[in-house]
Image (spheres, rainbow, N blue to C red):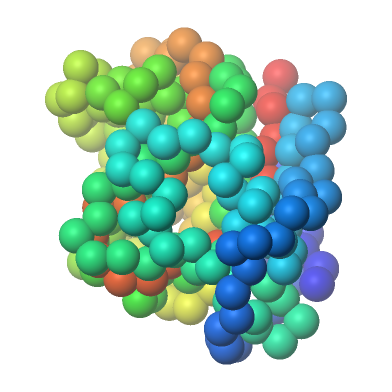
Amino acid sequence: MVFGYGVGTGQLLEQQEPKTSSTDSLSAKDISSFQIGEANWSWEISPSGVSAFLQNFHWLEGAPQDLNPSINKSGDNNLLELRGDSLSNFFVTHTNYQNVQVDYYLDWSGFKGEIELTNHVQDAQNYDFTILSSDGSITQGRVSDGERELFAEEEYAESGMTFVRVVGNGTHFRAYINKEMAVHGHGDAPEAGSIGIKLQGSGTVLIDKITLTKLN
């Protein structure tokens, strides 16, 4: 599988579209697919992706069991499948980052609700977000002391496995869906924090790959 995207842009060079068939990997131990560099990391889901998921993230809301994590085999690809009903689940990395670009390869076509791609997370009540809603809207903003502030909001029309890029760099915040910038907002520069995903709703989300690049 070959992916090529320029840092800080949404240019899509090549992407494979997976087809799904399921298998399980709850007991796998090998976490070598989670590659950590000096400042960056990349996680391409392997047959032992559930173990990597449990080891490299911790939960601010809910628990991993709520997500019924498993590995979904899709041709030559392995996808991490997260599914549940009436979810309110928030997991983040153990490490904090300042200026970041995070690339996600996701399929949320089977999910009804909101997927929050979060960065600069201080705790469950303070973080920046890009929300992909099943109603076709993408919003970007910040939660401060539990209150949501919007920086930008637009509509999108994507389905199946999709490349999403989220950039938080100083006072500039951008998100891309495949080749196109979807939202571009501005706000005060946040403190360093963790990155993660918050799921609110019901259904299935598939994760193919997540890559974090530290900027500046």
Whether residue 111 is visible: no
- Quadrant of residue 124 in the image? top left
- Residue at the location (36% across, 32% down)? 60
Left or right side of 197 for 38 = right
In this rendering, is residue 12 above or below 144?
Answer: below
Looking at the image, residue 40 lies above or below residue 190: below
Q: Quadrant of the C terminus?
A: top right
Q: Quick one: 39 or 190, which is closer to the camera? A: 39
Residue, x 46% and y 23% (percent of image)?
120
In the shown orientation, is residue 15 left or right of residue 179? right
Q: Position of residue 150 (x, y in %)?
A: 23, 34
50 lies left or right of 92:
right
Q: Is residue 14 visible?
A: yes
Q: Residue furthest left?
A: 147
27 over 142 or under it: above or below? below
Q: Residue at x 43, y 49 (%)?
A: 64
Q: Quadrant of residue 208?
A: bottom right
Image x and y of residue 106, in percent = 52, 64
Say which residue appears at 70% left-offset and 35% top-offset.
213
Residue 19 percent location from the top left of the image:
59, 87
The N terminus lies in which quarter of the figure? bottom right
Whether 96 is drawn above or below 6: the answer is above
Q: How many marks?
A: 0
Residue 53 drawn at (x, y percent): 59, 49
Which image quarter: residue 105?
Answer: bottom right
